[in-house]
Amino acid sequence: MQKDRMITGITPSGSMSLGNYLGVVKNLIEYQDQYDLFVFVANLHAITIPQDPTMLKAKTKEMTALYIACGLDPEKMTLFLQSDVVEHSQLGWILTTQSTMGELSRMTQFKDKSAKQGESENISIPTGLFTYPCLMAADILLYDPKYVPVGVDQKQHLELSRDIAIRMNNKYGEMHIVPEPILTKGNIKIMDLQDPTKKMSKSSNNPKAVIKMLDTPAEITNKIKSAITDSENLIKYDPVNKPGVSNLMNIYAIIKNFSIDDCHKRWAGKNYKDLKDDVTEALLELIIPIHEKYNEIIKGDYLKDVLENGALKAKKIAIKKVNKVQNKLGINWYRK
Ligand code: ATP
Ligand code: MG
């Protein structure tokens, strides 16, 4: 039986964070057995904010290797680099013509990220940061997937992709499958260790705020030690009033497959140091085998071969889809 297709990507705008791993990557390991899974490293999205070219190359390679080290198996799924399939840009451009300034202005991530660039005026904000949801819609619609796994922070972008798909289907005739979101199990949102009211982001300016999957054991230990809690010294899950403590409990619970009840029992009568020691231990147990696998596959031509094969598979589907869209819109007249 043909498996349903699923697609997702991650931007190599920094090293993979614990939030990315627990929120999305971990689930992909299960999805690769259930679905016809396509995963891409979104290097074209990375350049929506300024990047140092040498760093970008390194981060792109690192992200590819980490996906595999975390458990994605290129024998079971398709892993590729977004820029290797140029049809992403082609469809992305077409979709900028099918969306409106109003829609894109409402994207909260644009508001957050443009604010982060420190500019009150729009003059220095790259145009790509504004139009990026159209490229993201293209990344998805290019493959006609049934499902797109998303974290809560990406839900709005997926809504836009759906809106564009429906609009084009109505206007030009059926061409897109309207994708369904699959929200991360339990709506996982890992919070920033220094400001637990905002989500952990790999592109954060504060290194102490984010656990990176390639952090050394010593770095992880220190980051958890300095994670913000509160002065109450009471271990209780209460994300509104105790966001720091709740975030640490949540990290532990997800890694260990504990319920919040199990957590309350485990730390009844214990203090924040006990909690932090446990979280550190769970994190080290998680990352050490990932580091071992990473160090093994980063050498030689293995990753390049994986990406080349992945791009070939992705391109076959993408070329057909772009032709179809171009035909429907009247861009092509001689190619079927
Ligand atoms: P950036 O700061 O560059 O936006 P990011 O950490 O938000 O980085 P993305 O590349 O935007 O990562 O997102 C990759 C995937 O990880 C998305 O599906 C997103 O929903 C998920 N994700 C990102 N941060 C978290 C988090 N803190 N908790 C759970 N899931 C997350
Ligand atoms: Mg993000």
Image (tube, grey):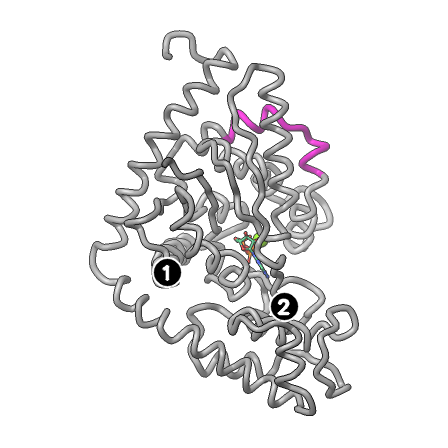
Q: Position of residue 147 (x, y in %)?
A: 52, 40
Q: Nearer the viewer, mark 1 or mark 2?
A: 1
Where the C terminus falls, by quadrant?
A: top left
Between 102 and 241, the one lying in front of the other is: 241
Residue at numbered disc 1: 71
- Lateral position of residue 102 relative to residue 334, left or right: right
Residues shaded magenta: 92-105
Q: Farthest residue toward the front?
A: 1
Three-letter amino acid code at disc 2?
A: Asp
Between 207 and 156, the one lying in front of the other is: 156
Q: CA distance from mark 1 to mark 2?
A: 25 Å
Quarter of the image holding residue 3? top left
Q: Is residue 141 magenta?
A: no
Q: Position of residue 153 (x, y in %)?
A: 63, 52
Quarter of the image holding residue 289? bottom left
Residue at numbered disc 2: 192
Which residue shows up at 62% across the image and 16% down it? 171
Image quarter for ligand 1: bottom right
Q: Position of residue 51 (x, y in %)?
A: 48, 53
Label 2 within 8 A of ligand 1 by Cβ: yes
Dot 1: element? loop
Q: Within 10 Å of the Cα at label 2, are there few (<14), some (14-19), or many (20+) other Cα atoms?
A: many
Q: Farthest residue toward the top?
A: 333
Three-letter amino acid code at disc 1?
A: Gly
